[in-house]
Image (cartoon, helix red, strand yellow):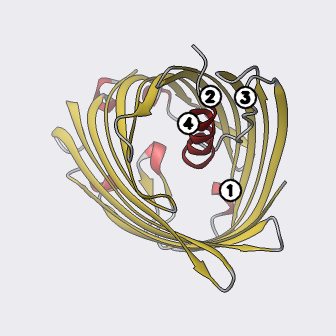
Amino acid sequence: MKLSAHTIKTSCALASVLFATPAVCDEGQASTEFSAEVGLGAEYDSNVTIDELDASSSESDYSLNMDVELQLDHQFNDTTNVAATYNFSQSNYDQFSFLDRQTHLLGLDLGTSFRKINSGLSLYYINARLDGSAFLKYYRASPYLSGFLAKKWFARGAYVYSDKTIEQNQGRDAQSHAGELDLYYFRRGLRSYFNFGYKYKDEDAIEDRFDYAANNIKARYVHRFDAFGDVLKTEFSWRYEHRNYSSVTPSIGEERDDKRHRWQVDIEYPVLGSGAIAVYAGYADYDSNYPRSDYDQEVVGTRLSYSW
């Protein structure tokens, strides 16, 4: 059954804003679109960390960040499209240069629509390096379903399988299974909306002490308003994660219990036609009975980007 032109355009706009997919949606016609974005920014971090290794320095530093994203989107017809993405990012620290991080991401997303239901499969591969040496390899596969529940309510559910390898500590190599649900309420269309999400994750590592089950909750509010002749975008977000480890951690003689709160504010304003300048600030409160994972962190940064 063919979708109406209104439904197609609405779904494409949502995909573009919510899932960073270009809106290439001429009804009934095949089309291909290429897009790219480059970004350059600077960041202050009050506590330089490597989250994958539960390592925090308790020291602050500045970093210079650069990223490039390339995306090719092909619309087969008015219901099916595929998008291929490559993302490169590099972070160089001033003092902690041995933690300079380079990340390559390859992504593929195949999506299709039937009546009021959108479905798809997203695949990702991530390769990260620290100080020029192999650090992390991460594979992710996620089938998903989405659609409108009512005029202003949109939902997306997904199953996520992931497999990660950490060169510096192979005991942390793990596979995980997760289920996630996102709910969107469009208060004023795409100019102002709320996003609430929940995810349950079960991770099984090589070493039992790294096995855990986690409950994740998030709340976001995005608002766009007119300012100085253009549209200013603001986003406020809060994320909470509770990790319940299933085995005793030898150094503390008991099972780990981590509770993580993260708040962030982002402001973005268009410049130079297809460019944008963003300013962001975040605060993280990691509460754990494992001392290496018990800390606070403040991050402040800015980013200048240009897309075409």
Residue, disc 2: 124
Amino acid on which the number 4 mark rests in the picture: Gln
Q: Residue furthest top?
A: 1
> Considering only order in the chain, which callout, 4 or 3, is on the residue closer to the N terminus?
3
The quadrant in which residue 220 appears is: bottom left
Picture layout, residue 297 above or below residue 10: below
Identify the amino acid type marked 3: Glu
- Which badge, 1 or 3, comes first in the chain's sequence? 3
Q: For the residue labelled by badge 4, is the local secondary structure a helix, a strand or a loop?
A: loop
> Viewer-proximal residue, 119 or 277?
119
Tag 3's secondary structure? loop
Q: Observer-nearest residue: 251 or 299?
A: 299
Quarter of the image where the N terminus is located: top right
Residue beneath the point at 57% across and 41% down = 10
Q: Which residue is mark 1?
A: 100
Q: Amino acid at mark 2?
A: Tyr
Q: Which residue is found at the position 73% from the left and 20% from the top?
A: 77
Q: Residues within 10 Å of mark 4 (few under 14, many from 20)?
A: few
In the rendered picture of this protein, how many numbered marks are placed on residues? 4
User: Local crowd at mark 3 within 10 Å, few (<14), some, or many (≥20)?
Assistant: some
Query: Spatial distance from mark 1 to mark 2, Cα to Cα?
Result: 22 Å
Please state which of the two labelled residues, at mark 3 or mark 4, is closer to the viewer. Answer: 3
The first of marks 2 and 4 along the sequence is 2
Q: CA distance from mark 1 to mark 3?
A: 46 Å
Which residue lies at the image location 80% right of the left edge and 24% below the top edge? 29
Label number found at residue 27: 3
Please state, as top left, top right, bottom left or bottom right, where the C terminus lies in the image: bottom right
